[in-house]
Image (cartoon, coloured by chain):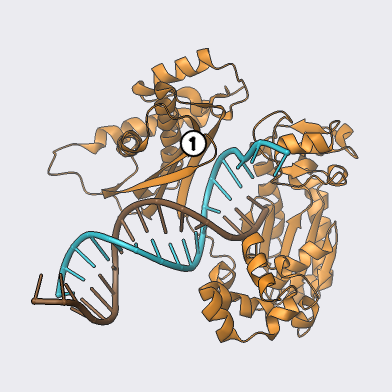
Chain colours: A orange, B cyan, C brown
Amino acid sequence: MKTIFHIDMDAFFVSVEELLDPTLKGKPVIVGGKGTERGVVSAASYEARKYGIHSAMPLRTAQQLCPHAIFLDGHMHLYKEYSDKVEAVLRTFSPLVDMASIDEAYMDMTGCERLFGPPLQAAHRLHQAITDKTGLNSSIGISTSRLVSKIASDQAKRNGILWILPGTEANWLAPLEVKRIPGVGKVTEKQLATIGIKRIGDLAQLDEKFLMDRFGKLGLALSGKAHGKDAGGWFDTEIGSNDDPKSISHEHTFNEDTSDFTTLRATLVRLCEKVMKRLRDHGLHARTTQLKLRFEGFETITRAKSLADPTDIDRDIVDAILQLFESNYPKGRKVRLLGVHVGQFTTTTPQPNLLTGQDDHKWRSALKAADKLKDKFGQDTLHLGGALKGIYKDRVHEAAPKDPIRKPKQ
DNA sequence: TCTGGGGTCCTAGGACCC
DNA sequence: TCTGGGGTCCTAGGACCC
């Protein structure tokens, strides 16, 4: 029998902002951008939530609901620092830690009784340690599975601890709405509602085979989850086996839709550079690359291409992406968003290309030097020559200083 | 109320091979 | 000549999470 903790930071981004500026406390604060901009709410203070504001809501909507709210751009690097601090505290309690996102983690606390006492006592000590070391509030769920602990930490909000005793999981879950189950969103919730399933208890009554026939793999997982088990998907994976990413991507939404070819090309090059820098930081090579185009009106397409050999060199991906772009972009059509995505990773060093006789070695050492500069002075330090003209143009003609992709580093 | 950015996983069709 | 069935890779799209 395992003892799993799920730790979830309370209003994380907003709470970090309050540490920086204590006068924000008790006020309606929204992190995500200005209330007049394109974008959505990343985090809302509890005061702001009283107005019906929640994460993923368009900023413009939030501003209508609460015109006097304080809108902040946010400081991602700072949130990451605090996230690392939290992780460090967790690791003083158990080596088996999975950061599931920037503000939540799973811990395997099985067998830690001798060190920290029974689960509830250990949780209180952990909770206090997080507050002492970071000044931040959190909520903790405890149970025998990741799934139940996750739902429990949600019910424990805010700044609380909830322990679901072994053997009582299904009973405790039964009265909760199905949308409490991670993986059940709007669509699945609606589909379940059409067959009269509203609560987790209703789901638990259903035959596993029935759910499987109706919802495929998702149905099978749902059946297990309704009984409090880590059934299928990543819930089933061991805590502490956090490996390399499976994909890396960057995308950019323009503050105003544009059909300017130079701007579009330059943006793509810069997105490629950011993606490849991170790929090299992980020591990985990518085999597939994908272009994402979102047009005026939100219609979105993706176009992918698999390369003959995995690569970690900017030029290879830039070539592929620009080729995809030029053969799929209807000239003149207004673009809302561009995205670059790489996947199918390998860690092996690719063979030198004997057929074309090209020597990647020079490129690689040049990129290495460039990466070092970027680490020191920021991503905007260096760009492929071809992008420069476009970036320059972009800066001169568009007077939107907030576009994060061309926001100069301080 | 006009919809960010970074991810994961699943499905489904077509190509291609045996 | 009017057509099987499996396996795998590739691609496009979508649900979902924070």
Q: Amino acid at mark 1?
A: Phe
Q: Residues within 10 Å of mark 1 (few under 14, many from 20)?
A: some
Task: State the residue at coordinates (20%, 36%).
Answer: A359
Q: Position of residue A232 (x, y in %)?
A: 55, 74
Q: Residue furthest top?
A: A396
Task: State the residue at coordinates (71%, 66%).
Answer: A179
* Chain identity of mark 1: A
Q: Position of residue A202 (x, y in %)?
A: 73, 80
Left or right placement of residue A129 versus residue A407 in this view: right
Q: Position of residue B18 (x, y in %)?
A: 14, 75
Left or right placement of residue A249 versus residue A8 in this view: left
Residue linked to disc 1: A295
Specify whether residue A39 is in view.
yes
Instruction: Give the structural element (helix, strand or loop) at label 1.
Output: strand
Q: Quadrant of the C terminus of chain A?
A: top right
Please say if A189 is above or below A387: below
Please say if A398 is above or below A297: above
Left or right placement of residue A187 versus residue A29 in this view: left
Q: How many marks?
A: 1
Q: Position of residue A76 (x, y in %)?
A: 65, 38
Q: Residue furthest right?
A: A26
